[in-house]
Image (tube, coloured by chain):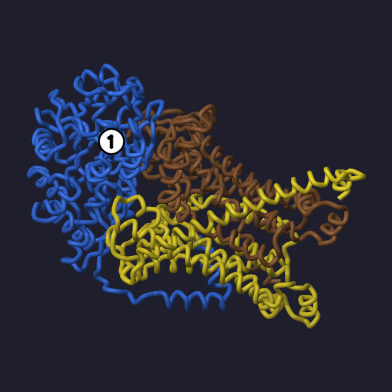
Chain colours: A brown, B blue, C yellow
Amino acid sequence: MWFRRLLAFFALLVPLVLLAIAAFLVFYAWPAIHYNGLDFLWRDTWNIGNQYANPVQRHGETVMPGAQFGILFLVAGTLGSALIALLFAFPLGLGAALFLSEAVPHRFGHFVSFFVELLAGIPSVVFGLWGIVFLIPFLSHHVFPILARIFHFIPFLARPIGSGYGLLTSSLVLCLMIVPFITATLRDALRSQSTEMREAGISLGATRFEVATRILLPGQKTALAGATMLAFGRALGETMAVLMVSGNALNYLPHNVYSPISTMAAFIVAQLDSALADPTGMAVRSLAEIAVLLLVISLITNGIARFLIGMLKEHTL
Amino acid sequence: MSKLRIHSLVRSPTLAALALAGLCALWPAPSQARTIHLIETGSTLLYPLFNLWVPTYTATHPGIRITTEATGSGTGIAQATANLVQLGASDAYLSPALQHLHPGLLNIPLAISSQMINYNLPGLNNRPLHLSGPVLAAIYAGQIRYWNAPAIRALNPDLPLPHHLILPIHRSDGSGDTFIFTQYLSFSTPAWMKSTGYGTTVSWPSVRGEIGATGNPGMVQALATNPYAIAYIGVSYRSAILKEHLGQAWLKNRAGQFVFLTHANVEAAVASRAPHTPPNQSISLVFAPGANAYPIINYEYVIVKNHQASRHVARAVREFLDWAIAPSGGNAPTFLNRVGFAPLPKLAVLQSQRQIAEIH
Amino acid sequence: MSQATRDLPPRPSSGWIRYRRIKSAIGWFLAGTALVALSVAMVQILLYVFLKGFHSLSPKILVENTVGVGGGLKNAILGTALLSGSAMILSALVGVAAGLYLSEFGEGRLGTLTRFLSDVLVGVPSIVLGFVGYVTLTVWLRWRFSLAAGAITLAVLMLPYIVRSTELALRRVASGIRESAYALGCRDHQVVFKVLLKAAAPGIGTGILLALAISAGETAPLLYTAGWSNYSWSGHLIHEPVAYLTYVIWSFIGEPFHSAHALAYVAAFLITFMILLINLLARFLIASSPHSNR
């Protein structure tokens, strides 16, 4: 029995670590949560206040005069970049998985999918480096001008195209980072279906494509939704690559897809430096509030994803 | 968290033994006990200078190791305050609130830096463009929106300025460059002081076409790729500006003269403002009086706690800083010219020495 | 299936069949294009990183420490190995034990909770862990930038991966083996150490290796916990910052110096190469295991 207790103790550590992190963050961010109130999410200014004045008392907290923390621009940047990334990643991942599972010989599919899954292993900073050195010059010189000219009538795609650091660039990089999740999960799910299903479909006169999309795929809807949700969660929390290619916008909403943005995760890295200079500590605590929000978001997205996958069967990713 | 480690080590002997063996194998023999490791972190503007200093200094001082890190002035100040590092580099002096909170914190000037206002006006980058604090403030506040606005034309009657939207570029990370640029705007334009003020990050007014950039390299790149943009960039990046064939503006100083960034004009500003430096050396050199004074210059500070972890560390810090500010040491032109900095004036050297002597 | 039958008309005309064939061909073409686009991007990134890195690579870079934005990467290579290695040891100790519990005795409430929360922990952005590590370990415990602060933060990051992969590997071990071991009178710990761990070793090892690969590529949790050092580690668990490769990539690519860029490229090359190698090793391990096909 002692052995089971020992193992249980270690198993208990996992939830304890997460709960400790959550409890600590909420506790640490509490003055900021109190000071910022509900406006935190809807306000569009992040201003750590006049650092060269004397601290003042406001709403019962000590802050620098003018200090005001609102992260609407971060919410917009985070959701915008993740959603656009998903917009690209979903069809790409779906198409690649279908092709790998149903159109090519099993061996070849296995080999290529391993290759695609390696994409998930490339570190975030390496994506960022590639983004800065290759993708941004390429996009801003060759792709964005053409895109803006063709779609000049669509406000969100029209000029100005900016410096190449921005929403669309971040989304493209994020897309590459999350596609392997969707492809790998869906391919495994498709492959796990019985050969009889395929044979039955073919014998009814359906083409292979029809078998894949109308017989095999509908059964994998929940797996696909779960994988997409996980990928979305990953895109929302991605830090380094976005930090390096987003342009780190401060206090403004993107006015087109080329606008610089910033995301909640990247903002913590980008602003921790300035925030540390705040003698009242409110700026760092407001960053902790962002971390709390990120934690809540990951709880929600993972919760939904696990629920969807759990609905399917007792199958782990 | 430490509990976690201890328990796991105690309770699973086989794995723990393995882990210990692994650690022991990795653990190098405690090397030279007398070696002192100083860590510098902070300002990205001072970083290149530290990187020039450190190899030279450590080559002649074998007992000392110095790690340099470019993080940002805010980190420099905070980590020196928290005793996480010995040397915090900052473009801005300590705020009164911080000094009040941490009485033992010293800000010691090491050199003098300056800032350029650069622009990208196709066809006009080689012609002298004149700008003033109020005009720049109006551009960054969105009140002047086109290059051929009357206020800009009035300063540059001879230039064929285009009717094109001005794209103001500002730093989106916390930055000493933002600090001194917004000081120039604040000191020259009361309206800016009232609405926005100065700081390492400020709440920029929303302007159509504005661009946020990270770090000085990001500023140069954003300016180079965006015609009709304007930016403020640290002097260390002058060679990059020249390489991209971008323009550098003449600025109106407190005396009403338009001056260009030259050694002589920086010296003139230093000569007029530096003598007013108080003993704790917290002073802005921006918008100095004097006919030839260049308006945007500043002390580059190292932030040090006066009480260090040990006597040996304190001595190492003192010796290094004394060398750094000596005209024959770190303030020699061989170092400063490569990053475009100016040496400290005599009075500032004396004051810095006095502050350095307080480190114990 | 019934849906498919419903969609097909009872007597297909040849025009209808041709229409469906063309539609299918277009569908495969689009799916294939998606795969090609992905593969091209993947190959492009890898080639770019490898060529750039290989171009700047020299023996000097591997054996010298960093000096400012020049010199070599010896300190960072050793630091990355040290940080990820110590994190792996810490994390594997806890993670394998927790995975054992989940697989063998984890049907109850604690099991369900642990499973769910460890899945949530996987999704927590790494910067959140870094932020907490900074405020608690670096500042509050006064460990400063150090191996201990960095390794513990990384270990937390790796933990859920190891827990779940261990559980999965153990569940693949046929229950007959367990039952026979218990029938022979084995106690819990004997079953675990003598039977289960041996049978599931390749799977567990794969999980640990994959977690190691993830941790080696991380940057955000280390920025404010491990710090950065121009020198190789000298043996202090706390109070001494540690260099690591991903820092070089992030920080040096922003510097306007050629030598800095060269170091960033080499660092990217080395870390990508290392991670791909670990991934390949993990695949090899699982493929060579006798239980790979259940």
Indicate the position of residue C64 as horizontal and vertical percent values: 30, 69
Q: Quadrant of residue C285?
A: bottom right
Chain under disc 1: B
Q: Residue at x 79, y 50 (%)?
A: A210
Residue at 52%, 69% in the rendered image: C277
- Is residue A32 visible in the rendered structure shown here? no
Farthest residue toward the right? C10
Q: Could you tell me residue B1's position as x and y percent?
A: 51, 60
Farthest-out residue, front? C14
- Name the quarter where the C terminus of chain A is drawn: bottom right
**How many labels were placed on the picture?**
1
* Quadrant of the drawing holding the N terminus of chain A: bottom right
Is residue A2 shown left or right of residue C278? right
Q: Amino acid at mark 1?
A: Tyr
Q: Residue at x 24, y 53 (%)?
A: B307
Is residue B158 visible in the rendered image? The answer is yes
Name the residue: 52% across, 64% down.
Answer: C213
Q: Crowding at label 1, few (<14), some or many (≥20) Cα neighbours within 10 Å?
A: many
Residue at label 1?
Answer: B232
Corner quadrant of residue B132: top left
